[in-house]
Image: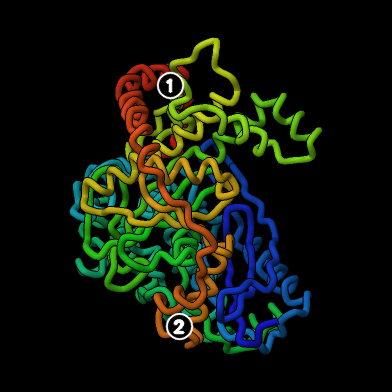
Amino acid sequence: MPEAPYLLGIDYGTGGVRVGIFDRDGSPVDFASVEVLTRYPRSGWAEQDPAGWWSGLVQAVRKVLAKRRVHADQIAGISAGATSATVVVMDGQARPLRPAIMWMDVRAADQADRVANTKDPALKYNGHGPVSAEWGVPKVMWLKENEPATWRNAAHVVDGEDWLIQRLTGRWAASINIAASKYYYDRAAGGFPEKMFRDVGIEDLLEKYPSDVLDLGAVVGGLRADVAKELGLNADIPVAEGGVDAYLGALGLGVVEPGKMAMITGSSHVMIGQSAAPIYGAGFWGAYTDALVRGQYTVEGGQASTGSLVAWFKNGYAGHQVAEAKERGIDPYLVLNEQAGKVPIGCEGLVGLDYFQGSRSPHNDPLARGMLWGLSLGHTPGHVFRALLESICYGTETVFQAMRSSNFEPQQIVVTGGPTKSDLWMQMHSDVSNVPIAMTKVSEGSVLGSAMLAAVGAGIYPDIQSAAEGMVHIDRVVEPDHARHEEYAFYLDKYIRSYAAMKDLVHETVRHLGSADPAGA
């Protein structure tokens, strides 16, 4: 067992809270998780109770300490990440006035359109295109317009991570990471876009939002004595400013210098990269000033359906492969990967489009839908599965192309998540985009990223870059095959043209069904 000090990282995801303890070298010691309930009062709405967040944190910290591999006296620092644009409204005694509106909640679609219609210069963060209903500003507008009594009684309107930091320290402060990426804060342009806020009727938001906007890793304060007792920790442990869980996942992958790109995979793909210069353009979000590392700019893109698309096929259309896997005592995905690996590039003319739940980027089109075309009687489940994987990789490449068009060139992709278990998938990503794909030793990127910020706050490392150098370790790298890259180029072109060719027909059909999915709006 490595010696103290240890760092406590907290990750508030949609499904619950996860706590991890790491040593100063980034090696994990223990983890503990507690689920948190999400309620869906109406279609498109999603809410959680902050009391459940706190109860989950207390349980998780006590669970991880109960393993007795690390004593409370050995914890040197704490930090946290949380879902972003998760809006919490509180009274003057810091009591929630209503359930938190979660990041995935899209009730504010009309308000998002009105933000876009302002044409404010701050919309550079959206590439001057559509505004997501998931962002904080539209949700704040919805609250003020639809719950005026709640708004009048609100002394504090903050994001979920800011709520947690206040509970831990007693200080109201905002993370620059969240303020920039979800509330249009730009330090280089003077802070928040006050004219935009006036134009959409929420000029009084700044009276309720924390006035202190802190960099990641900055010490917000010491752990309050009453909270320390509840958690089973020591009082006055330094609590460092955290941020968006996905962005801390990028830190946990060592993405702290220009040219590097994190790809955080699961049911979706999130791509987060660092640029030396401020760049803006259609097809991606950002570049956010100082959002991860002071003096750098952060760009982001995302695909709505990736791992969820693969699971859709496995669960609904791969009965024979699932049965074979059960007989052989292996994961069904291994069987599917084996079959897809025998299929040539391009799947003998079968092309897929991965927009099964709309397109987040580069198109930001909630009415887009997926497709498979070029089917023949000779195509097998292996062909279909490979076509789905290829479509996801083509989708990733189109996001990279949008960034390249604005002079951001990803030079190395660092990946985390379940898809990294598929050598076929990772090689495909590398070949399609012609970039190396790296994987780290620690897969718990968001929790490790929180621990890295805790290490900076505790003074173990002087800055985030040093923490990344000391705590993030590359396990393996997949290099691209240039010949395969050239072969994929033909089918990538067909993928891109598929969306353009079918867009109008798909939109008409989705509107006819009355079931447009606003998840990417």
Query: Residue 202 lies in what quarter of the image?
Result: bottom left
Kind of residue at disc 2: Val
Residue 424 in view of the camera: yes
Q: CA distance from mark 2 to mark 1?
A: 49 Å
- Residue occupying image coordinates x 64% and y 31%: 314
**Residue at mark 2:** 219
Q: Nearer the viewer, residue 355 or 507?
A: 355
Which part of the image, by quadrant, shows the N terminus? Answer: bottom right
Spot occupied by residue 234 in the image (x, y as percentages of width and height): 65, 87
Q: Quadrant of the C terminus?
A: top left
Q: Tell me whether circle 2 and circle 1 mark residues in contact (CB < 8 Å).
A: no
Q: Which residue is mark 1?
A: 510
Residue 96, image x and y in percent? 55, 63
Residue type (three-letter) at the residue carrying disc 1: Val
Q: Secondary structure at mark 1?
A: helix
Q: Is residue 390 above or below residue 280?
A: above
User: Which residue sits at x=32%, y=54%?
Assistant: 410
